[in-house]
């Protein structure tokens, strides 16, 4: 899940971003509307956590720009303007949800996950393949009924592969979806994480690798 946090208060933006990353999300940050607009042109985000009172391009204008896109991100307005009138205005502008500051962080996480599920391109809640079942909401993954003890990144990689299956995801695709814009494109973190995930999944193997193409989930019963 790829998230953009648009917040001009640097300390708050960092806290929100780190908290969402701890939940397995890939998070980028923009401190003004112009930077956010540029990032939105480059990356397909699932959810934008958006402050209203932004320098450069106001949050209201940015919200309208997002909602006019064909494959648009879901918008959660996170702002100090929390009166009923402010909420109505934000939702009228096209925001999908509205949360006033100060906020309870677990509620923010739940709202972000709920918005990601509501996105038109989102898929079924429980993902299944090769005896693996993954529930992104409950953060639960099992194989043949055995619970998998996965790290945050291992869980996110498995989720990305299950969502893409049976198509391939390259290492660059996984960096883009699971990590964020600060990830080193020359790092070996993807094969290392996939290697750990394979060991935890056990046999028969369901993650296959094609050199120069990438990784994908395959059902052992369909493998030659």
Image: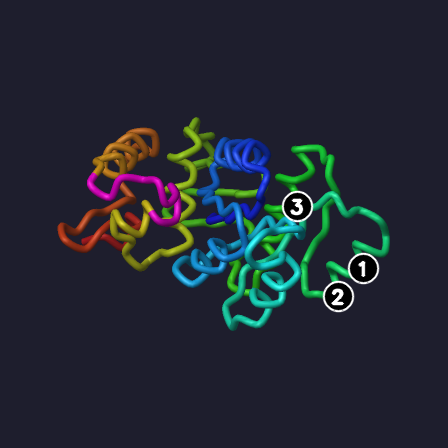
Question: For numbered disc 3, what is the local secondary structure?
Answer: helix
Please name the residue that numbered disc 3 is placed on.
111
Q: Which residue occupies the foreground of this view, 222 or 67?
A: 67
Disc 3 or 2, which lies upstream in sequence? 2
Q: Which residue occupies the foreground of this view, 214 or 37?
A: 37
Snapshot quadrant of residue 188:
top left
Marking on residue 219: none
Horizontal arrangement in the rendering, residue 88 relative to residue 36 (left or right): right
Q: Is residue 70 above or below residue 181?
A: below
Pinpoint residue 87: horizontal percent, then vertical percent: 79, 54
**Residue, x 59% and y 38% (percent of image)?**
9
**Residue, x 24% and y 44% (percent of image)?**
185
Please name the residue that numbered disc 2 is placed on.
92
| Residue at the far front in the pictured view | 56
Report if residue 48 lies within the magenta region: no
* Magenta region: 176-186
Question: For numbered disc 1, what is the local secondary structure?
Answer: helix
Snapshot quadrant of residue 60:
bottom right
Assess whether mark 2 and mark 1 are in contact (beta carbons under 8 angstroms): yes
Q: Quadrant of the C terminus?
A: bottom left
Horizontal arrangement in the rendering, residue 81 relative to residue 129 (left or right): right
Pinpoint residue 46: horizontal percent, then vertical percent: 51, 55
């Amino acid at each position: 899940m790829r998230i953009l946090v648009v917040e001009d208060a640097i300390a708050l933006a960092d806290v929100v971003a780190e908290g969402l990353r701890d939940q397995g999300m890939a998070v980028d940050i923009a401190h003004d509307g112009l930077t956010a607009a540029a990032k939105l042109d480059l990356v397909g985000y699932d959810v934008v956590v958006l402050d209203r009172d932004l320098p450069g391009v106001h949050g209201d204008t940015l919200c309208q720009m997002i909602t006019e896109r064909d494959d648009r991100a879901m918008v959660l307005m996170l702002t100090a303007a929390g009166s009923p009138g402010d909420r109505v205005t934000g939702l009228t502008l096209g925001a999908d949800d509205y949360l006033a500051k100060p906020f309870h962080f677990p509620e923010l996480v739940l709202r972000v996950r709920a918005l990601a599920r509501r996105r038109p391109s989102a898929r079924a809640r429980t993902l299944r393949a090769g005896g693996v079942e993954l529930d992104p909401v409950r953060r639960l993954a099992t194989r043949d009924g055995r619970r998998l003890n996965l790290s945050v990144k291992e869980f996110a990689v498995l989720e990305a592969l299950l969502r893409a299956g049976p198509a391939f995801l390259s290492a660059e695709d996984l960096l883009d979806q699971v990590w964020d814009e600060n990830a080193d494109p020359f790092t070996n973190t993807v094969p290392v994480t996939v290697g750990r995930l394979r060991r935890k999944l056990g046999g028969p193997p369901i993650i296959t690798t094609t050199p120069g193409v990438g990784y994908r989930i395959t059902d052992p019963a369909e493998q030659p």
